[in-house]
Image (cartoon, rainbow, N blue to C red):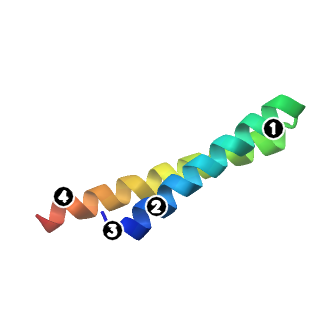
Amino acid sequence: MSGEQKSEAKTEQAKGKIKEIAGRTVGNERLEAEGRGEQAKGDAREAKEKIKDVFKH
C-alpha cells in the first residue's frame, strides 16, 4: 500500500471517529452518521489499497 494512500485512509478513519464521538456526545445524530460514513470511506480506501498490494506481488 502506498504510504500516502495509507495515511489518507487512516486520517479519514480518525476524523470519522472523532465526528462520531462528538455527535454522540452532543446528541447530534447527523454528525454521528457523518462520522460513521467517513470511517467507512477510510475503511474502503484501506481495503482497496490492500487489494492492490496483493495483485502487485
Observer-side mark, 2 or 1, equals: 2
Q: Tag 2, which secondary structure?
A: helix
Q: Which residue lies furthest to the left in this view?
A: 57
- Residue contact at pointers 2 and 1, CB within 8 angstroms: no
Q: How many marks?
A: 4
Label 1: how many residues lie within 10 Å, few (<14), some (14-19) or many (20+)?
some
Residue 35, position as x, y percentages in the image: 69, 45
> The disc labelled 3 sits on which kind of residue?
Ser
Provide the residue designation for mark 4: 54
> How far separated are the C-alphas under marks 2 and 3?
9 Å
Observer-side mark, 3 or 1, equals: 3
The residue located at (40%, 55%) in the rendering is 46
> How far separated are the C-alphas under marks 3 and 1?
32 Å
Residue 45, position as x, y percentages in the image: 45, 58
Provide the residue designation for mark 2: 7
Label 4: how many residues lie within 10 Å, few (<14), some (14-19) or many (20+)?
few
Q: Which mark is residue 23?
A: 1
Q: Residue 41 carries which label?
A: none
Residue in the foreground of this view, choosing between 14 and 40: 14
Which badge, 3 or 1, is on the more N-terminal residue? 3
> The disc labelled 1 sits on which kind of residue?
Gly
Whether residue 18 sits left or right of residue 31 in the image: it is left
